Amino acid sequence: MADPMISQSKLNIAASTTPRHQHHLHLENPTPPPSSSKHVNRLLNSNHYISPSRPIYSDRFIPCRSSSNFGLFNISLPQPSATAGISPGCGGKEDNPSAYAALLRDALFGPQNPDKKDWGAGAAGQNIFRYKMETRQSLHSLSPFGFDDMSDLGVSNVAIKTPRKVSRSPYKVLDAPALQDDFYLNLVDWSSHNVLAVGLGNCVYLWNACSSKVTKLCDLGNDDGVCSVGWAHRGTHLAIGTSNGKVQIWDASRCKRIRTMEGHRLRVGALAWSSSMLSSGSRDKSILQRDIRAREDFVSKLSGHKSEVCGLKWSYDNRELASGGNDNRLFVWNQHSSQPVLKYCDHTAAVKAIAWSPHLHGLLASGGGTADRCIRFWNTTTNSHLSCIDTGSQVCNLVWSKNVNELVSTHGFSQNQIILWRYPTMSKLATLTGHTFRVLYLAISPDGQTIVTGAGDETLRFWKH
């Protein structure tokens, strides 16, 4: 009697063969072995042994190559003869995949238009992986519907970059009584903790941008006044320059003065932090370098300007200090120099507006006053003047966007406007108006999404840019 397991294998394999492929497997019924050799024969014919608990599959995979695009690699496929009929691997009329293959081929490689080069017509010896223009389709060509340029759907392949919309109106306006209309002062600064410091008369106020809470930090008294404010990088300590030539350091979280430093003979109108180093510029034409960790009021004195120092900015790597003065000069100092290492004398009016680019090392922008009206760009690495643009108005402040390569400038006489520029083309993205006096003060939020401007009209205006 035949082995029941082998007979069962024949039945299962015959039942698993589908009419689509019609690959009939003929297994000869072996001579019934002796019962003692049943186990050995089962091992020899183990590929035919099918466990009743497992699903039954065909024993091998026979690919259908009729839908393969051999022309992509310049491989010619032998054409079947006319008498060959339908290939056994492609099925009959109901299951013929030729329509799907043609649709997939057009979607992946583009329609085979008559004006395109024949895929299979390549020169002998040509590299099989050569680049072909026909394969460089847009992402839209991967559509299962096979549209080459999606024009039939009314969709264009070319992505049109729409201009970024900038609101022309401030989203918030705050009253700032006693905000001075003085070009040489710097009375507004925004900390990394999102707190705005404003000098109003002889007082300094803190405005928390998260809670809108206003705190009076200090009152210098009737015999003194606030000329400049500057936050340390950590956002916890505020430096205040006074009209008496002193610099005070305040702990903003505790509203407590922790130090007073002297050294200047006249008002301190400019401040700039570099880690634990604080630079102060004064009407006495000098710049003092102060290390707040040292006991001395200042560790070095920088001399070079012939008039009041009204602009100070450290580079983002804290290696270079740029200073501007009422002598129309722009100087660049390093960490250890007592004399300027670079001198720029192209401006024809006071240089208060100074800004280092956070996007390109060594790129410095500067703006001149009423008689100059120009924004100039410098490469301090190569000591070269890059470009100049006449804005038509007094340039009061400059600040680079933290997120994109754009520049914000504020202006005085005669238009009192705020301009957003795209660098390096210096095309105007937006012109913002609303202040009725010179826009003398400018600061940017820590996330780079908002700017605040202040003017002699005693208002602070907040803009999204």
Image (cartoon, rainbow, N blue to C red):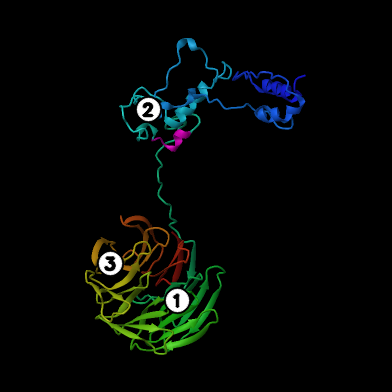
Q: Which mark is residue 74?
A: 2
Mark 1 or 2, closer to the camera: 2
Residue 383 placement: quadrant: bottom left
265 in relation to 213, above or below: below
SS for callout 2: loop
Q: In this view of the protein, which residue sits in the foreground, 313 or 200?
A: 313
317 lies above or below 419: below
- Closer mark to the observer between disc 2 and disc 3: 2
Looking at the rendered structure, which numbered label has been put on residue 135?
A: none
13 on left or right of 192: right
Looking at the rendered structure, the kind of residue marked 3 is Thr
- Mark 3 element type: loop
How far is the residue under mark 1 from the one under mark 2?
67 Å
Along the viewing direction, whichever of 11 and 223 lies nearer the viewer: 11
Foreground disc of the pair 1, 3: 3
- In this rendered view, identify the residue nearer to me: 203 or 235: 235
Q: Is residue 336 magenta?
A: no
Magenta region, residue range = 136-142
Amino acid type indicated by mark 2: Asn
Image spot of residue 111 (x, y percent):
42, 26
Look at the image and tell me in which quarter the C terminus lies. Answer: bottom left
Q: Which residue occupies the foreground of this view, 275 or 174?
A: 275
Judge the density around disc 1: few (<14), some (14-19), many (≥20) Cα neighbours within 10 Å: some
Name which residue type carries label 1. Ala
Residue behind mark 1: 232
Label 1–label 2 contact, CB within 8 A = no
Name the image quarter holding the N terminus: top right
Quote the CA–CA distance across marks 1 and 3: 26 Å
Compared to residue 353, the image places residue 163 above or below, namely above
Q: Is residue 211 visible?
A: yes
Question: Can residue 50 be seen at all in this image of the molecule?
Answer: no
- Residue beneath disc 3: 381
